[in-house]
Amino acid sequence: MQDQPLHEPQFALHVEDLTVTYGAQPALWDIDLDIPPGVMAAVVGPNGSGKSTLLKSVLGLIRPVAGHVRIFGRPIAQGRGRVGYVPQRSAVDWDFPTTVLDVVTMGLYARIGWLRRPGRAHRDQAMAALAELGMQDFADRQISQLSGGQQQRVFIARALVQQADLYLLDEPLAAVDATTERIIMDLLKRLRDQGRTIVVVHHDLTTVRRYFDWMVMLNVRIIGQGPVAQVFTAENLRAAYGGQLALIEGGAVDPADPHP
Amino acid sequence: MTAVLEALGLLFQPGIVQTVVLGAALLGGLAGALGAFAVLRQQSLLGDALSHATLPGVCLGFLVAGSRDLGAILLGAFLAGGLAALSIMLITRATRLKTDAALGIVLSVFFAAGVVLLTVAQGQPGAAQAGLSTFLFGQAAAILRTDLWIMSGVAALAAGTLAALWKEVKLVTFDPDYARALGLPVLLIEGVVTLLIALAIVVGLQLAGVILMVALLIAPAAAARQWVRSLGAMVWLSAGLGAAAGITGALISATGRGLSTGPVVVLVASALVLASMLLAPERGLIWRWGRAARARRGIAGRRVLAAFHGLAEAHDDPAYPTEEGMLTTLIGRPGPGVMERLERDGMIRRVDHPPETTRHWELTERGHDRAKRDQGGRP
Ligand SMILES: Nc1ncnc2c1ncn2[C@@H]1O[C@H](COP(=O)(O)OP(=O)(O)O)[C@@H](O)[C@H]1O
Ligand SMILES: [Mg+2]
């Protein structure tokens, strides 16, 4: 692959003019997005607002009709090694016959390379990642025998072994128990403090301020992006959530600026 | 008995029976191993669509070659299967149709075309000798010694490919999006697996026919899934069950009575599925019923202990003798075996409470402890 000149390398993630459609319906419309390195960013928006589509487009899993994406200045094909992905838990069949350790080891497959099997060292890396998520005792467990929170932690351990600089997580806190939520957030904070960039699709508006320092509000278009305090406003929430705003004004969340 | 011995005897003489048995074993093993991936990708219908779709290829191969030239027929079958796979992919990509709809469309269109071509081909001279209609349900007796080499070749190709691409195939089967995110060529790997499945179908046509072929792919894998804890074990066991079904079915049909091999092999494989669904530990129905019954008994037992404990506390007498009728009034019949089990576990004991002659129970020390612990909400 020829080396293109870097484009906007000052950002961990740079998205420009991105439009994605399924059939005729746009799922993302003319997205411009920049996420600086070392932040913990929440991507919020109502159901169907294109959050998962955004992550998949960044990873090159969906071909956009327009626009481009850069990871630390490089196109995704050359930046893959620096990106870790945690898909939505529902993306796979958890009845697949395999063990926790095996799933986590999958995060190393690209690095292990063709025609080679995972070895002792890879196993140790996977065990270390499991330990970070308090799952070391589950290494030999069938994945079909895990709770939702444990499944989520396995997925995160799999991304963790990738040793990425940019992590993309799709609803890692959806329907998990309180213990899992704390373990995951502690880990993500540690990663952020090591200088990694964390992008989390997040559905719970009540915890945005507590957990995140950066925010992207999305509803097919970008509603707002930047430090949480600037973006998490009643005005933006109304723009993103529209009719569902009653829920928000009911006091469940506490936007930075209650009087637009 | 003598018939079985006779059949086993035939197995060790070079001849038609040995050829059929070897062919059925090879094919059962090959289809079983590859079927594991179809089952896990929830693409059982893909196998069905591909095998039905080979029929027009079989007929065209015959029409072009003008005789029973197996090479031409199998090549035609393979090309038709490939075209069908391609059509399915294009339909799901280019339209809003879901995969199962695309599979259904391709299956029926190709099969309909096949039936029409079959009618045409049967008007040709030589069609009867070519035994074209046997490709519908298969005719194992038509398998030749040389066909075994083709089957072995395909089996070796499949085994070699799976061994070489093992971890990639596993990841693509489990989580294709993640595989793509890691940079694996997912489309290529899926294509290779589909190609191997198509090859297995094509070489299996003579034995099982286009209609029953899918059962040889799916049944051993569905049975194997019940017993295993890893993909490797599933593929091996599925291959083993497929081969076993092939050998058993071929021997059964060799004992005479004019049973044709393909359907018998399919029936044996189906029996394996049924047995596995019932008997497998953890996933089998019987095991699950047992577990549910144990859980029900456990809950019933706890309710009995709680009721006794409550009555004892109400009467301020830990040894309060509760009449069984009282218990039934309070919580209903505890169910068969529940009281006996509690007694055996030393939670309750029978006591006499004259002048009444009905059965009475009192809670033991252990029973009180357990009831108190349950109250605390701990298991
Ligand atoms: N594979 C697909 N085919 C067709 N439409 C899709 C597909 N995936 C998502 N969509 C549609 O695109 C929109 C955005 O979906 P998604 O990115 O999953 O939203 P979110 O993750 O924010 O809930 C939704 O309207 C959804 O119905
Ligand atoms: Mg989503």
Image: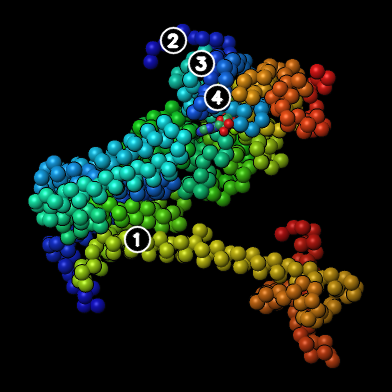
Labelled pair 4, 2 in contact (Cβ < 8 Å): no
- Indicate the amino acid at tag 2: Gln
Q: Chain of mark 1?
A: B
Label disc, if present, on residue A4 of the rendered structure: 2
Q: Chain of mark 3?
A: A
Q: Residues within 10 Å of mark 3 (few under 14, many from 20)?
A: some
Residue placed under numbered mark 4 in the picture? A26
Residue placed under numbered mark 3 in the picture? A67
Left or right position of B306 against B63: right
- Indicate the amino acid at tag 1: Ala
Would you say residue B261 is visible in this rendering? yes
Q: Helix or strand or loop: what does disc 4 sit on?
A: strand
Q: Helix or strand or loop: what does disc 3 sit on?
A: strand
- Indicate the amino acid at tag 4: Pro
The residue sitting at 57% across, 17% down in the picture is A30
Q: Earlier in the sequence, mark 4 or mark 2?
A: 2
